Image (cartoon, rainbow, N blue to C red):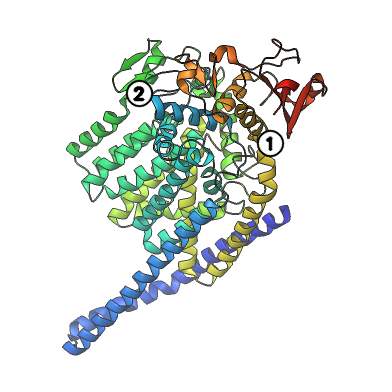
Amino acid sequence: MNALNSICRWAVMGIVAAAALHWLIDRVPAIGRGLSRCLSYVRRKNAAINVSDGGSARRTAGERVERGEAERGYRLGIWLILYGLVAIRSIGFGSIPGGFNQDGAMGAVDALALATYGTDRFGNWLPAHFQAWGYGQMSVLLSYLTVPFIWLWGLDSVTARLPMLLASIAGAWALHGLARDLFGRRCGLVTLLCVAVSPWHFMQSRWALDCNMFPHMFILGLYFLNRGLHKSRCLYLSMVFFALCMYAYGVSFYMVPVFLLLSCALLLLGRRVKWRQAILAAAVYFGLSWPIYGTMLINFMGWETIRLPFTTMAFFPDSMRSGDIIFFSEQPLLQLLQNARALWRQVFLQKPDLLWNAMDDFGTMYLCTMPLVLAGAGITFCRAIRGEKSQRMSCALLLIYWGTSLMTGLFINNVNINRINIIFYCHIAFAGIGAFAIIREWKRLAAGLAAVYGLLLVLFLNQYFTDWADQIEKHFFADFLEAVEYAGELEADYYYITPDSQSDGSWWVSQILTMYAMKMDAGYFQGKTNVFRGAEIPYEDRYHFSNASGELIQDNANIVYVVRADRIAEYAPERFNRRQFGNYYVVVPWWFAR
């Protein structure tokens, strides 16, 4: 695979270099041809060539036919690519990746509580931010978007992941629209194809992690912001998506306001928006996002939780997230250098990251794509300076997006793919622009690019659905969840569930995974009711996340143990019935065996 990656990297670099050389060689005679065309045009105007009405009508009819055919071909291409994008992301959806990530499980549990009571699992009414693990909080947007699907079909792996898939499709469509508006519909077509084959876009769309909602909301906002240069209502609609970014990931606080301020200054100076429009757009943005800003202010100042009829802005006394920001580092300069190195390695070199974020052999955008990204960035920069007036402003917005994304990567300590996910749509756009420019200059290279990325996509999907799928189940607790689901069906009086799921003693992970697997009622968890799954026993008395030694609480009690395989020897087979689920066992006393 390393050899193949090297071949693909050199192939793409060769294509980029050949296209650049072709462009340079072609520029010299192009000047002469341009002058000749200008002179010919002048001569034709001076000669006042008369064209018969019949001939003009025939040409007009022919042009209409050609435009109609081109339009039909474009629409067919768009729908075929979009169909392929959705189809490959839907294969085995809900079952691959197997199991469920602990953060995704937490968001799903809170979504179930919101769907049932309008609170999180702790009873906070419509929170602007979740308490999560206590020491670290979690964004709420994904959970709120999950609520309608829980109302329709209940909670399972499909309904918990479906909002991310739909948001990913919407983000891909928005990026296509942005590229189309900047460089034409053929560029939009190529860019949509780049999104369809992107490993990052594919992988994040198939599991539920709250922070991955951020780039989709942002690219939707950018698309409508660019559209808003011509239609005011799109400008205000863009503010809705930028406001939603604030509820999608805490990193947005270091990126979105800076982007909006720079963009506002640019548009005002360029007289593309009026002060009245800018003020109204700001009102829309802050009108939707002020609860999350209020939550951040409350935690910064150490104020008490504020509960309003429509939201809760909570204080989190044990928060540790400030340690992730360079401004709170003990050695900011050294941390800045480390952050720059992490940004370079993760984004530009595509070095290995966590298994669920990227596959080592392919990276986030395939290891050979960076030449196209840099070429597209260069083209965008040139058009921002020397392009048409409307195009200059749009390209400048895309470059501001890139610059603020890079700035975010420098501010966040030791970024991984999740923390810098905001930059990947920008890089996919640059790759699409670069590929389109190459194809336009030298159409014969289109087949080469298609062959390289077609082969990489096939290899990527093959590894994703085979080797990677087998590996990820262990990281997403598939065995543990299967064991807990079975244990829940037994409706025992007492549960002793191992705290050693993620690591030794990580009882909080075992707890949230158990709540997800058993679809635990938030009212029962809070102690508002003592009835759940066939027993009238309070939650605190019934569920214990600790390693029991096999000693029974009381004779004839209906007890279920979920234990890790390395402790199964403590449960003698003559006293217990044991059922294995991979690395875990469900153990019950012999009189409770079923």
Which quadrant does the N terminus fall into?
bottom right
- Horizontal side of 586 relative to 155 (left or right) equals right
Identified by mark 1, the residue type is Lys
At label 2, counting other C-alpha atoms closer than 10 Å, the crowd grade (few under 14, some 14-19, many 20 or more) is: some
Q: Nearer the viewer, residue 67 or 458?
A: 458
- Disc 2 on helix, strand or loop? helix
Q: Which residue is mark 1?
A: 474
> Residue 240 location in percent, x, y?
30, 37
**Quarter where residue 474 is shown:** top right
Q: Please name the residue shown 43% across and 66% down the image.
A: 77
Distance CA(mark 1)–CA(mark 2): 38 Å
Q: Nearer the viewer, residue 506 or 232?
A: 506
Q: Please name the residue shown 32% across and 54% down the image.
A: 391
Q: Nearer the viewer, mark 1 or mark 2?
A: 1
Q: Earlier in the sequence, mark 1 or mark 2?
A: 2
Q: Which residue is mark 2?
A: 293
